Image: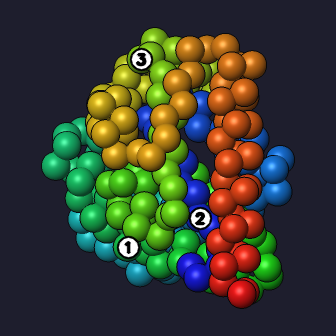
Amino acid sequence: MSRLYVIGVTGPMGSGKSEVTKVFAETGFSVIDADILSRRVVEPGSPCLKRLVESFSDEILNSDGTLNRRELAKRAFASREKTELLNSITHPYIIELTRSILNETEQYGVPAAVIDAALLFESGMNSVCDKTVAVIAPFEIRLERVLKRDSGLDREQAVLRMSAQQPEEYYIKRADFVIRNSGDYRSLREQAEKLAQKFREWADEKQKCRTE
């Protein structure tokens, strides 16, 4: 993006990255939720859904042809190899859609956009970002948040999904900034607000440089 300042926010399940993204949105940044995009790319009749069926069987479909996300998750998170297969199929479609949305956002003159993506680094989506932020939290805090948020998941399913994700060090090593969530909501917001102010200043500088 030549003028649009792009920030990638990532972190494991239940870390609190959505709360950080909310703070950035309050600052006036446009937000792209990769989880929502992941649902769009698997709509009935889509090339992505077709490839998923070829790889995981038609048992991942509901009777109306829509994706049964729980059944897909059950199969895809059964092993690291299956998880990698899932990602290799869906990531290219999600990245393509993300780039399209970023281009539209830039045309509207928005100064900055935030990509909220759990698999920001794994998918390669960080390549379109000016800066990246990782939100991390202790496992038990994350597990409690996941169980409270996703009523359809039992403890065993939640632990299975969380275990399929990268360890904390993975995010710390790759991100430009790290926000640590200890479970204190006020502290989480304060960290996010400080970063948002920096990003706003850098976004304004980027736009100014491109217009001079």
Q: Looking at the rendered structure, which numbered label has been put on residue 139?
A: 3
Q: Distance of mark 2 from mark 3, alpha carbons?
A: 29 Å
- Residue 148 lies, in percent from the top left, at 63, 21
**What scheme was used to colour the molecule?**
rainbow
Q: Residues within 10 Å of mark 2 (few under 14, many from 20)?
A: many
- Residue 131 lies, in percent from the top left, at 51, 56
- Residue 126 lies, in percent from the top left, at 42, 61
Residue type of the residue flagged with mark 1: Pro
Q: Distance of mark 1 from mark 3, alpha carbons?
A: 29 Å
Which residue is located at x 40 percent, y 67 percent?
127
Q: Which residue is mark 1?
A: 92
Residue lying at the far front of the rendered structure: 212
- Residue 124 lies, in percent from the top left, at 35, 64
Q: Distance of mark 1 from mark 2, alpha carbons?
A: 19 Å
Between disc 1 and disc 2, whose residue precedes? 2
Label 2: which secondary element: strand
Task: Give the quadrant of residue 59.
Answer: bottom left
Which residue is located at x 50 percent, y 64 percent?
129
Q: Disc 1 or disc 2, which is closer to the eye?
A: 2
Residue 19 vs 94, above or below: the answer is above
Q: Is residue 179 left or right of residue 208?
A: left
User: Considering the image in quadrants, where does the C terminus appear?
Assistant: bottom right
Label 1: which secondary element: helix
Q: Is residue 206 left or right of residue 81?
A: right
Q: Is residue 145 left or right of residue 169?
A: right
Q: Which residue is mark 2?
A: 6
- Whether residue 98 appears in this view of the structure is yes
Between disc 2 and disc 3, whose residue precedes? 2
User: Considering the image in quadrants, where does the N terminus appear?
Assistant: bottom right
Residue type of the residue flagged with mark 3: Phe
Which residue is located at x 26 percent, y 49 percent?
83
